[in-house]
Amino acid sequence: TVTVTNTGNDVLNNVSVTDNPAVTLSCTGGGTNSCGAIAVGGSCTCTGSYTTVEQPSASNRFRIGAVGNYVVAALRGK
């Protein structure tokens, strides 16, 4: 779950949100990977999921691979 909050003084329009392992995010107010407009003091919550894969280690024990994650919220052109 990712929450994008507008702490500025202007409405944010066309806010898109991406998360590297979760291909599709469902966002309140906008739909898939989009928050639409976020009012001053408002927020948008996006949820998504992804599956990690177990990898055998040198001792043939399985471990969950490390997962790197970053999320980007960006304004698209007016």
Image (cartoon, grey):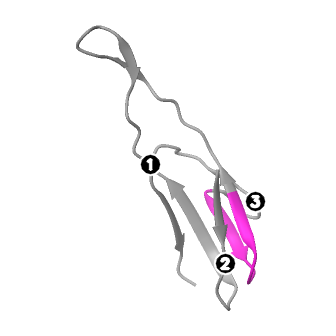
For residue 50, which numbered disc appears in the image?
none
Tell me the quarter of the image containing the C terminus. bottom right
Q: Which residues are magenta?
A: 33-45
Q: Which residue is mark 1?
A: 69
Which of pointers 3 and 1 lies earlier in the amino acid sequence? 3
The amino acid marked with disc number 2 is: Asn
Does 42 sit above or below residue 22? below
Judged left or right of residue 34, residue 50 is left
Q: Which kind of residue does numbered mark 1 sit on? A: Asn
The crowd level at tag 3 (other Cα within 10 Å; few <14, some 14-19, many 20+) is: some
Q: Is residue 37 left or right of residue 59?
A: right
| Number of on-image labels | 3
Q: What's under tag 3, amino acid-wise?
A: Thr
- Circles 1 and 2, Cβ within 8 Å, touching? The answer is no
Cα distance in 3D space between marks 3 and 1? 21 Å
Which residue is the site of mark 2?
6
Q: Earlier in the sequence, mark 3 or mark 2?
A: 2
Residue 52 drawn in magenta: no
- Residue pictured at 69% horizontal, 70% vertical: 36
Residue carrying label 3 = 28
Q: Residue 58 is drawn in which quadrant?
A: top left
Q: Is residue 60 left or right of residue 11?
A: left
Q: Is residue 44 magenta?
A: yes
Image location of residue 68, percent across then percent down: 39, 45
Query: At 54% from the left edge and 36% from the top edge, which residue is drawn?
Result: 50
Q: Residues within 10 Å of mark 2 (few under 14, many from 20)?
A: some
Residue 72 image point, x, y percent? 49, 63
